[in-house]
Image (cartoon, helix red, strand yellow):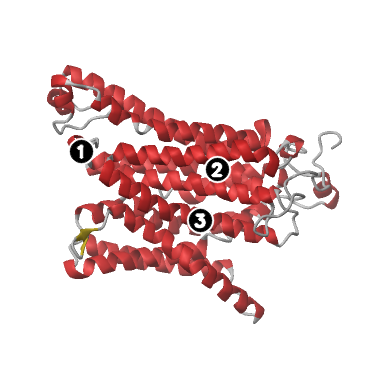
Amino acid sequence: MDGGQISTQPMQDDGRASRPLFGLPRGAVLVIFVEFWERFSFYGMLAILVLFLRDDPSNGGFGWDAADALTLVGTYSACMYGLPWLGGIIADRFIGFRNAILVGLVLMTAGHLLMAVPHLIIAATAGPVGDALLAGAPIGELLPTDTTVLALGPGAVSVSLVVGLTFYGALLCLVVGNMLMKSPLIVLMGELFDEADPKREAAFSYYYLSISVGSLFAGLVIGTLAQSAGWDAGFALAGLGMATALLSYLMLGPRMLGNAGRGDRVRPASPVGESQADIASGANPYAGLIPVFTLGIFLTLFEIGWFQLYGSWALVIEEQLDRAVAGFTVPTPWFQSVNAAVVIAITPIAAMLFVRLARRGRNVGVIEKYAAALFFCAISQFLMAWVAAGGGTAAALVVVVLAIILVSLGELLAWPSTYGMVYSAAPAAWVASVMGAWYLLTLLFPC
């Protein structure tokens, strides 16, 4: 590179030249693997968070009321999806993609493991104070009400405050780590391919599929462990999943990623991020962002409905639904895994169908896909509203599963093409920032 400008020549030793793995650059496979474990931890923790907050302290929960629990989950989710734009700016302008990912993974590993600590603090508290903590009054609140203070007593209130500080400290680590890691990781995937390489879109599809597979196993494994061995065990397992992502990145990254995501390539070429080629041609590097963010508004509407799966839907399923099947009570987190299972099962069928339609000149555009996604999401909301209003007990379980299937079909239509679309439309010097802004637009407001 000369004069601080972005090179238009292919990067050397950037993870493409090494022998491919599963038909993709080895670096791309590593990114997909890291994302699988990160999403396994994220969705596993999210699947049990509202249930943990609502559960009685004698069972290891915090005993919060539904409104406070849903507010916390919504705020946490909003931060997780609303702040990656800031992490993208930090990666684009200052520390680079690779360093941002590393720091993010370290913080998220620490945050997930810290989530298991509040229970250990309570378990280590003996005598009258320990008994007061388990008596049923809400714990872990930074601003307890007068009623809570009276119920707990001075000693237990102090311990509850330490528990709360630890809990919120864990959430802070998760939020900041995710802020730094989320956008740069998917941008790193794009950097492993030449612009015209058709395998790039396939890699983005596998990337999205890894999210669904991680979500599927998260609800089944972490959800089951949490409800059988305790919430702290579930949080600890999420931490181990995140540690796997971190160690994989540390041990395999230098060899499999090469120089991708390093150096001056992440620095802006000019104050507005234009390359010299853009300037010479008179092209506006931001022209493609207008339709992208217009579509983002429609995706926001869809995500408002989809996110209920981890909030109000979870409480309806846990507290109002008869989940007994042949004498077995289905754990609530398993219903969230249905979402991922549908996406995994239908993805190859949908991909084959869309390819065949395109070959016959009947290509299904993004607008049509988004419209269908909104339609499926709206029907799912009506179905869940019927269940919440006391719909027939015998049919309610089937209706809930149908609602999840419909919203999952909408997800499959709306999301897989999004990553490649945003990556291609973003100015080269601001791609991580734009990816983060996309998350802010489409996923912050639904939370």
Q: CA distance from mark 3 to mark 2?
A: 20 Å
- In the picture, the quarter occupied by the N terminus is top right
Of the image marks 1 and 2, the number of the one nearer the N terminus? 1
Tag of residue 239 = none
Of the image marks 1 and 3, the number of the one nearer the N terminus? 1
Quadrant assignment, res 126 = top left
Which residue was labeled with disc 1? Answer: 59
Q: CA distance from mark 1 to mark 2?
A: 34 Å
Answer whether labels 1 and 3 touch (C-beta < 8 Å). Answer: no
Query: Mark 2 falls on what kind of element?
Result: helix
Which residue was labeled with disc 3? Answer: 297
Label 3 amino acid?
Ile
Which residue was labeled with disc 2? Answer: 182
**Image-based side of 393 in relation to 337, left or right:** left
Label 1 amino acid?
Asn
Answer whether labels 3 and 2 touch (C-beta < 8 Å). Answer: no
The crowding category of the residue bearing disc 2, from other C-alpha atoms within 10 Å (few below 14, some 14 to 19, many at least 20), is many
